[in-house]
């Protein structure tokens, strides 16, 4: 019958080899089955009371309704309301995928009360984990256990006088399973998170943390979500770190030096919003010292950041008009010059149509730069106004394109802290003209209906020279060489340095597409030739020949790049990355990268099942080695075991630790062990193994079976 059927309103049917009946009672034996709607009760003997609608069953009792199946020794069932009480019950609650047993099971509608009980989501042939408790109350969303013990593989590992576990995706306040790890420098690292389910759209997590050799602290996170904004706030505090004095680690202190433990902390804020045509973004991060991320972590994608960014941004877009306001600052995590802050930056851009294929555009920005002190003296700061009007002719067909553009790049400064002999209001004007043309050619291949393309491209850039040695360098950065860089109008990021150019670039790209249009292989090679000698930063090396390969087919993928500087007669960069991926649990990556003059590294990682009959077991490892300095940057190895109800990961790692506050100090390798356990359907212990695997093994995804 339909699941919504009212069983109590249905007639009672009794099927038995023998039965006796009176006006008030029915007694059946010999293997009895009682049916009422979707309800079924079977036993050796069953007695029915006609006046109270009670059924009492003995011997080999089996009871079932939609969502529940129970076996036991004796049972009492109220056929008028479905109330069931069974002794020595072994049960399966199929709606919430939970099974177990209890000395006594009491069920009324969707609520189950268990005494002397065991609960698990593992199949009957698995002893991976279970919860034993004096009593367990199970409703539609949660299982509440009193006197609970978590048993893993038959061994009790955790006790709680009160434990509330979710049996659906619904959130509830309560303790989460603890996190545990070990580090050679810090010792045992324990945390016990408590989750606050404050409202449907916001929550918080607070985690007391104890680090054996450092001390005690606390971490917290607050999340908020509505139709307009998505916000996450986080922070951590460690009181009196016994291994750090605010400047150096205890291991770096000289004998007899005074060592005073320092408080350590971190703050993070991330907010994204959308109000009509406005977009907002706030990204803020701060730590107490440069070594914080290396020592204590912080959930960042990479612990080897050079600096932490603080950004607040407001953007507006409507049609061809864009506008924005930006405030940006940094906390540098390595010795060196502090980056300049943009406080603020205002930008405005517009693209307008003209007759035919003509169009015009105007982009302008005004930025006020602050900070940037090098420590020795006050650096030049000031305001910068940059304006770029351009005129563009664009012709595009299915077989090719031709773009002609011309414009002026005007920059004006109002500087502070300049020497007397230096102009505090310099200006610069650069004229540019660009011709960019390309063809799209293709031919079918006989095999499988594949297509090969041939896409030649010719680019000419003429950019006038302007003296710039007297201008500040607020946001200058040298861009990494690439195929796309051959066709840009500046080899620097920012506008404080704009190169003069009389350059011709020629490139060709060929792609191989399958019958669905998916890219199988792409090969690009190009070169740039200068018709005149460069006058702006000629000492800066620049690759003028670049080749790139990107391909993926079946289980294999490849990514490679070669950037050659013909002036030096040597490669500026070479990289090769090979991947073999069978599925989410079988991945091999091999990579090598060399970049003049500082990078020469190998990176090998693997995730693979154990051979033979060791079903559910996987091994993983990473080896990231720096050949220039002859040392390992990071290495880890471990194993994982997973089945339908538990996921265990154990990782041993060695990581290069270079104190950032002490320039020139010796590096060392720190070792540690991390453990992560996920009890599928309930909760987990730790997340730090997954975070390392995501960062260290390309193609790894948390939660893979």
Image (cartoon, rainbow, N blue to C red):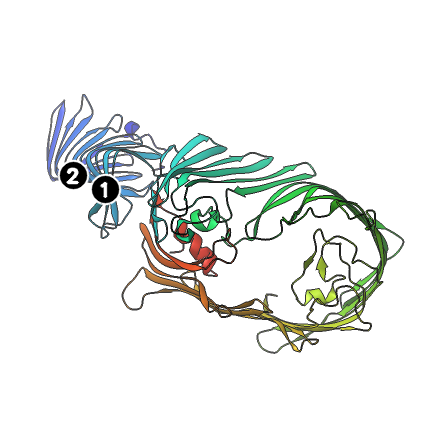
Residue 551 in view here? no
Using the image as rendered, state which of residue 74 and residue 637 is in the foreground. 637
Q: Along the horizontal axis of the image, is 403 left or right of 4?
A: right
Judge the density around disc 1: few (<14), some (14-19), many (≥20) Cα neighbours within 10 Å: many
Using the image as rendered, state which of residue 696 and residue 550 is in the foreground. 696
Q: Along the horizontal axis of the image, is 274 left or right of 235?
A: right
Name of the residue lying farthest toward the top: 51
What label does residue 455 carry, if any?
A: none
Q: Position of residue 438 (x, y in %)?
A: 76, 69
As drawn, 78 above or below 459: above
User: Which of labels 2 and 1 is toward the front?
Assistant: 1
Q: Position of residue 213 (x, y in %)?
A: 34, 46
Q: Which residue is mark 1?
A: 100
At 32% from the left edge and 43% from the top edge, which residue is drawn? 97
Circle nearer the N terminus (2, 1):
2
> Do tag 2 and tag 1 residues touch (Cβ < 8 Å)?
no
- Image quadrant of residue 406? bottom right
Using the image as rendered, state which of residue 527 and residue 116 is in the foreground. 527
At 32% from the left edge and 53% from the top edge, which residue is drawn? 648
Separation (CA) of disc 2 from disc 1: 12 Å
Judge the density around disc 2: few (<14), some (14-19), many (≥20) Cα neighbours within 10 Å: many
As drawn, 387 above or below 69: below
In the rendered image, the quadrant that contains the N terminus is top left
Q: Position of residue 157 (x, y in %)?
A: 24, 44
Using the image as rendered, state which of residue 644 and residue 134 is in the foreground. 134
Q: Along the horizontal axis of the image, is 574 left or right of 620?
A: right
Q: Position of residue 320 (x, y in %)?
A: 78, 46
Q: Along the horizontal axis of the image, is 678 left or right of 305?
A: left
Q: Secondary structure at mark 2?
A: strand
Q: Which residue is mark 2?
A: 72
């Amino acid at each position: 019958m339909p699941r919504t059927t009212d069983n109590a309103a249905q007639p009672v049917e009794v099927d038995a080899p023998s039965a006796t009946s009176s006006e008030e009672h029915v007694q059946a034996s010999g293997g009895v089955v009682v049916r009422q709607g979707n309800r079924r009760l079977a036993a050796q003997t069953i007695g029915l009371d006609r006046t109270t609608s009670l059924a009492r069953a003995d011997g080999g009792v089996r009871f079932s309704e939609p969502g529940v199946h129970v076996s036991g020794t004796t049972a009492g069932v109220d056929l008028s309301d479905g109330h069931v009480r069974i002794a020595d019950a072994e049960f399966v609650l199929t709606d919430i995928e939970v099974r177990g047993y209890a000395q006594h099971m009491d069920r009324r509608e969707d609520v189950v009360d268990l005494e002397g009980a065991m609960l698990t989501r593992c199949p009957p042939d698995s002893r991976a984990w279970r919860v034993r408790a004096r009593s367990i109350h199970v409703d539609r969303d949660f299982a509440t256990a009193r006197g609970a013990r978590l048993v893993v593989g038959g061994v009790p590992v955790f006790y709680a006088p009160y434990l509330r576990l979710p049996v659906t995706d619904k959130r509830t306040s309560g303790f989460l399973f603890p996190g545990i790890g070990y580090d050679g420098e810090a010792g045992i690292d324990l945390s016990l998170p408590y989750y606050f389910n404050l409202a449907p759209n916001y929550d918080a997590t607070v985690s007391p943390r104890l680090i054996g050799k450092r001390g005690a602290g606390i971490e917290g996170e607050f999340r908020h979500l509505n139709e307009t904004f998505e916000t996450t706030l986080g922070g951590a505090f460690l009181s009196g770190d016994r291994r750090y004095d605010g400047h150096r680690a205890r291991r770096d202190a000289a004998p007899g030096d005074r060592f005073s433990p320092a408080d350590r902390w971190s703050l993070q804020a991330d907010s994204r919003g959308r109000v009509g045509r406005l977009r907002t973004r706030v990204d803020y991060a701060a730590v107490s010292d440069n070594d914080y991320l290396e020592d204590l972590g912080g959930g960042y994608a990479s612990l080897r950041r050079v600096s932490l960014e603080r950004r607040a941004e407001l953007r507006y877009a409507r049609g061809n008009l864009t506008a924005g306001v930006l405030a940006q600052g940094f906390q540098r995590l390595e010795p060196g010059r502090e980056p300049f802050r943009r406080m603020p930056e205002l930008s405005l851009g517009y693209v307008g149509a003209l007759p035919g294929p003509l169009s015009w555009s105007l982009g302008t920005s005004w930025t006020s730069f602050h900070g940037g002190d090098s420590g020795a003296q006050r650096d030049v700061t000031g305001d910068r106004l940059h304006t770029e009007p351009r005129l563009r002719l664009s012709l595009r067909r299915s077989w090719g394109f031709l773009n002609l553009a011309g414009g002026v790049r005007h920059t004006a400064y109002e500087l502070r802290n300049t020497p007397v002999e230096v102009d505090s209001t310099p200006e610069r004007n650069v004229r540019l003209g660009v011709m960019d043309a390309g063809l799209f050619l293709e031919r079918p291949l006989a095999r499988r209906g594949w297509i090969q393309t041939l896409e030649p491209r010719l680019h000419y850039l003429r950019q006038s020279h302007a003296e710039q040695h007297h201008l500040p360098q607020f946001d200058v950065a040298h861009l990494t060489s690439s195929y796309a860089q051959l066709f840009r109008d500046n080899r620097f990021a920012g506008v404080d340095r704009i190169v003069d150019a009389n350059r011709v670039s020629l490139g060709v790209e060929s792609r191989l597409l399958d019958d669905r249009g998916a890219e199988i292989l792409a090969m690009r090679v190009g070169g740039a030739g200068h018709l005149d000698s460069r006058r702006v930063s000629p000492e800066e090396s620049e690759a003028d020949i670049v080749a790139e390969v990107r391909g993926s087919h079946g289980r294999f993928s490849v990514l490679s790049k070669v950037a050659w500087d013909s002036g030096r007669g040597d490669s500026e960069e070479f990289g090769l990355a090979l991947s073999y991926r069978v599925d989410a649990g079988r991945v091999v990556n091999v990579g090598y990268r060399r970049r003049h003059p500082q990078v020469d590294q190998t990176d090998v990682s693997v995730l693979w099942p154990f051979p033979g009959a060791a079903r559910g077991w996987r091994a993983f490892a990473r080896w990231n080695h720096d050949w220039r300095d002859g040392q390992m940057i990071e290495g880890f190895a471990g194993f994982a075991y997973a089945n339908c109800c538990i996921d265990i990961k154990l990782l041993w790692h060695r990581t290069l630790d270079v104190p950032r506050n002490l320039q020139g100090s010796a590096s060392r390798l720190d070792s540690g062990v991390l453990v992560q356990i996920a009890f599928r359907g309930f909760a987990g212990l730790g997340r730090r193994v997954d975070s390392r695997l995501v960062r260290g093994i390309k193609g790894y995804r948390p939660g893979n079976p």
